[in-house]
Amino acid sequence: MEILGPRGTRDILPEESYLWQKVETILHQVAQQYGFSEVRLPVFEHTELFERGVGDTTDIVQKEMYTFTDRGQRSITLRPEGTAPSVRSFIEHKFYNKAQPTKWYYMGPMFRYDRPQAGRFRQFHQFGVEAFGTSDPDIDAEVIAILVRIVKTMGISQFQLHLNSVGCPDCRPLYRERLIQYLTPFESDLCADCIQRFHKNPLRILDCKSPKCQLAVKGHPVLSDYLCDRCGQHFEQVKSTLNLYGIDYELDPQLVRGLDYYTKTAFELLLPDLGAQAAIGGGGRYDGLIEECGGPPTPGIGFAIGLERLLSAAQKQNSKAWQAKSYSPIDVFVVAAEDEFIPDACVMLEGIRNSGIKADKDYLNRSLKAQMKFAGKTGARWVVVIGEEEKTSGYYILRDMKLHEQHQIPADQIVDEIKSIMVKPEEEQYAE
Ligand code: AMP
């Protein structure tokens, strides 16, 4: 019986994985331009970390975690997100004792038991950044600038940045109270989830996607009217630094994170053309989270972006740079016209590879004609042919499959000839 991959997972095959490598290169480069360093953390953690770090009233913790008991009777969860593990690691390795801020980024698979649909998977990938140890509003703007730079570098030009401030434990309780007062007449009209979170996490009702809840919150009091002076000033500074960076944003009073450890800045990047799954990434400040997870009071801010959605947006908006079909695993295919020239082909092949060029040869004892046909299938730009005449003269045939022309070149000049025509990967342009 054939065994298929589990529901909600997908295989990233070679014709696509090279695009992922291009995305990953951009992510490493952009994060490092902003002084962030990579952390590589385990894909599973103690369940309690997510209960505390993500929040036990969230959908992630209540419905979506891959939790199991391991052979040592510990409750283990496949990570559904990267912030809580980053915070755990920051505390465990006592990074709070070092000079601050600590600027980290991560990328890798995340796991959520969600209903799979277009753009939503059970194993998906996120890239995220976390800046610990400073409450300077300029770092909020910097983190947002990274998100914007990533999408722009990929050639995504149509997007909206939504921005809000969710206040802090000083100013939010009053707002919470007002919101509960406002929503009380609509309580029974809300969706089942929101009825449940009505008293525990009422702010989340604001960003609930259910039409019933959207109707109920119309005309709701706005949090920015309730911000304390500190939060108000912080928000102004974030906005003015974003203006300095030339980053456009839309204020969105419904953009919230309901839990106490989320503070001040919240943001989300939306794409008009991704349909139901419009959010490509989002984040915010979480000045209470590190303490919640057992560390000393330390401010923090970060975001996460979904790589499946990032790539599919790039493919829609900048299809020339991101289409999968232009992929070829090799640049050069070396053909031995007869078996006796296979050793010469091997020497040529290794010589080409030594110079950093991707090359291959036949391994199925194909005829000359079949080798040429196979070389065409690999998508190699060049074919080197070595036969009786070439061996004797020392001039090998170099065929350019793209221009459909061929020349005889001294064997020791083949590599230089290819190099002079080749586009180096670093010269490739992603953005249009
Ligand atoms: P979140 O951690 O829920 O704020 O999600 C951040 C980003 O991760 C989203 O905007 C998506 O791009 C991506 N994402 C979250 N959940 C999924 C999923 N189940 N499948 C694919 N991408 C996801």
Image (cartoon, helix red, strand yellow):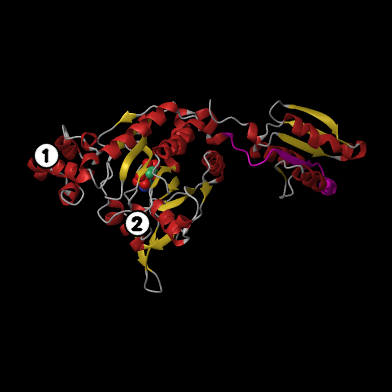
* The image quadrant in which ligand 1 is located: top left
What residue is pinned by disc 2?
Answer: 291
Residue 329 is covered by the magenta coloring:
yes
Q: Give the alpha-carbon distance from disc 1 to disc 2, as whole Å.
A: 32 Å
Which amino acid type is marked by label 1?
A: Tyr
- Judged by depth in the image, the label closer to the viewer, 1 or 2, is 2
What residue is pinned by disc 1?
Answer: 182
Give whichever of 148, 118 is nearer the camera.
148
Residue 330 is covered by the magenta coloring:
yes
Check disc 2 and report its element: helix, strand or loop. Answer: helix
Q: Earlier in the sequence, mark 1 or mark 2?
A: 1
Please state the horizontal and vertical placement of residue 128, each as a whole percent of the image.
44, 45
Sort mark 2 into few (<14), some (14-19) or many (20+) by Cα contacts within 10 Å: some
Q: Which image quadrant is residue 271 in?
A: top left
Which amino acid type is marked by label 2?
A: Glu
- Position of 17 with respect to 383 (left or right) is left
Please state the horizontal and vertical placement of residue 203, each as a whole percent of the image.
22, 44
Check disc 1 and report its element: helix, strand or loop. Answer: helix
Above-or-below relation of 331 to 95: above
Q: Which residues are magenta?
A: 326-344
Give whichever of 421, 158 is nearer the camera.
158
Residue at (45%, 49%) from the top-left corner?
10
